Amino acid sequence: MKLERELMRGAGPTAVLQLLSRREMYGYELVEALSKRSEGVLSMGQSTLYPMLYNLEAKGLVEAEWRTAGSGRERKYYHLTARGSKKLAKDREAWTALGSAMIALGVVKGAVA
Amino acid sequence: MNTQNPLPSAWRWSLRYSPIMRVIRGIDERVRRRRLGAQTIAASGLPAPLQKRIAAIVGRTRLHASEQRDIARELISHCFEAIESAKDEPEILASLGDPKTIAPLLRRAAKRKRPLIYQLRRRAAQALLITFGLSILFYGLIAIRFYAGSPTIKTDYMAKINAPILAAPESDKAWPVYQQALIEWYQIEARLVANTLVDPDEQNQLFVHPGPHNLHEIPAGHPDREMTIEAMKAYRPTLDRVIDATRRPMIGMLLSDQTREIQIEGTDRTLTVTSAPSSRSGPLFQTLLPHLGQLRFLSKMLAFDSNIAIEEGDADRAAADIAALLRLSNQVKSEPFYISQLVSSTIYNFAQSQIHRLYVLSPGLLEREHVIELSHLLADARPQSLDMTSERDGFLDTLQRTFTDDGSGDGRMTPEGARFIGEFHRPLLDLGEIPELGMDSWLTQTSTKAAEPLASVLIASRAEQRRVYDELLAATAAAIAQGPQGLPAMWDWDTRMERLQTSPVTNWSPVSILTPSFIKGVSTVFGSQARTDATGVLLAADAYRLDHGAWPESLDLLVPRYLPAIPDDPFEPGASILYKTTPSGPTIWFRGADGDNDNARRVGASTDEYKARSFTRRYSQGFTDIPDADWVVFPPDLD
């Protein structure tokens, strides 16, 4: 299942921040991780990922650094900044509240509090 | 090998860092960087379709070369990771996306990453562009509004002034007689010039071009003296007609904004007169008043004739000439132009000077009836105010020719108005004249034209112009009513009008262009009033002398039979005019600009006499050149 564009626009950056909160990752790695962990729901191509990463970088939520891997290949690694961590914490609260509301409304299946 | 550069090192440095070389270096650097970006993709070793797609994406971003290279490196890296993960080429191409879609997204995101200074510059440029755009739009709206406006000429003010003249019978008009008299004198003068009038010492050029000079200006024994006197006597029948014409109710010359020349027969001279008014009158403020100078000339003829009469002991003739001068002054004053009031005042002063001269040269000449007639005429001509009717009409006429009319007396500047004002005033946007750049022609004209619409928003509205003008007229009337102590208020107005005239915006408005300083007029009224009062005292004292055989010892003796009241001294509130009598005759004086009685002391030879007569020096602050002297009206200093 694929998310609609508007929904992806809201969920995508939070998902990327979440992945980067665990460790630094490069672009391809992020594409793959998003696809696998979300079971394809949040999978996105380079056309979506890189503009999103640049936007996060412009906002100071992530930082990037070119490094040469063991294979000799150049990779651009992204990692979360302090501001990015704060933003992620806020997004988590918002998504949690949204999820609860959706469950309460019966939009999302789950235990009703 | 000689490697020495023929150019001096300073020149080489200047050339290397010149602006044009900087531009060339900048272009070269950009091309070089783009080439590097392309080389980066080419050197990646990716399959050609992928290289082509990445180049298409990167190229479409139109970012800086360094940004393009960074994106290219990242996409190349991504593609290699995908290849290593066993993704096939179509899948990778699909993942890369359509260049048309992804490039703008990358472009927007990459630009957001640019430094703060770039963002600020970008915002500033956007703000500037928006401001410029809005300004153009705003100016366009102003221009549309400006060019949509046009003046409506509702009142023919010139016809309004000419109407009573046209309605009056010819026998009421003095001008035809005056005009003929002037023509006849010019013919006599031409004959005089042809015959003699050579200064024996070739020093005094006065008599080479004879005219009605005061007789005392021609030295006794000069060959021109007798000839000029004879010429004047021959002219007396004409002058008698002039004297009669001064009894007519009006000058009666039709006003027009056009003049014509009347060729005077037997001479090479012409007389300038106004043309008959056309069906559509021109602007009233451009009305020509050539007759004022001519009437001033005619008044000198009367003064000259009275001088001859005084020398001859002809009391009837001298009194008739002086009475004619006073009546002529009244006729001119009845023309409601400010300049007419000033000329009237000049003629009035001629008349009084002749009375004073007569009493110095021939104290017992006048008989009772002469004294009474002159006293009455003098009292009638005493100025009470300045008639500004036509001055105001001229201003209102200009407003109706320059502003729109919203029906309630308001409006804004029109293109016709801007051109009208521009004809006799400097351009609204004055770039000055730089002839070598042609700025006095093309650029100035273009800038003036482009700036014209500004007039509709910058220049005060029609109602505002009229309000300021009427305020000034009211202040002028109030100052005259108050007396010389009201002059400082007029100075304040002068300062206010000067500010309007020097402001880059308001100096273009009718109220600042067309409003003269009325201070001179107001001061002239006060001066004339004082002089009239002094002359009235002189005539009253002479009437007393005729009855009692001696000049009165004090003015109290004159009231009420010869004078209704002792006149005030305008230089000292509450004080009266000063008088004393000596064996040689009476002395009549005012305290003068210093405000105290100096017992009829005149200003010294090195001081201008007008300073003692200056009401401005008496009642305004800041003057240091106030003479310690009085204004002695009688006897005059005939030298």
Image: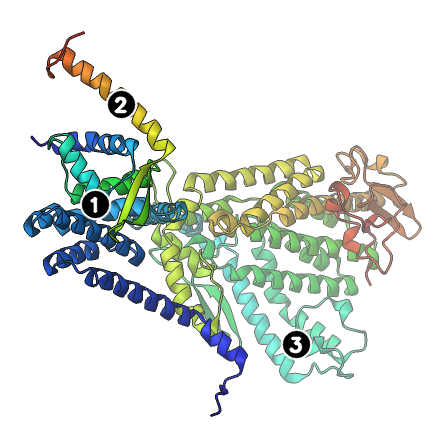
Q: Comparing marks 3 and 2, which lies closer to the viewer?
A: 2
Q: How many residues crowd mark 3 within 10 Å: few (<14), some (14–19), many (20+)?
A: few
The location of residue B508, given as percent across then percent down, is: 47, 52
Confirm whether residue B413 shows in the render. no
* Dot label at residue A92: 2
* Dot label at residue B52: none
Quarter of the C terminus of chain B within the rendering: bottom right
Marks 3/1: CA–CA distance: 95 Å
Tag 3 residue: B209
Please tell me if label 1 and label 2 are on a single chain.
Answer: no
The location of residue B382, given as percent across then percent down, is: 66, 44
Q: How many residues crowd mark 2 within 10 Å: few (<14), some (14–19), many (20+)?
A: some
Marks 1/2: CA–CA distance: 26 Å
The location of residue B47, given as percent across then percent down, is: 12, 59
Instruction: Depth check: give the residue in front, B607 or B548.
Output: B607
Residue in view at x 35 percent, y 38 percent? A60
Instruction: Depth check: give the residue in front, B292 or B430.
Output: B430
Q: Secondary structure at mark 3?
A: loop
Which kind of residue does numbered mark 1 sit on?
Leu
Taking the image as shown, residue B610 lies to the left or right of residue B507, namely right
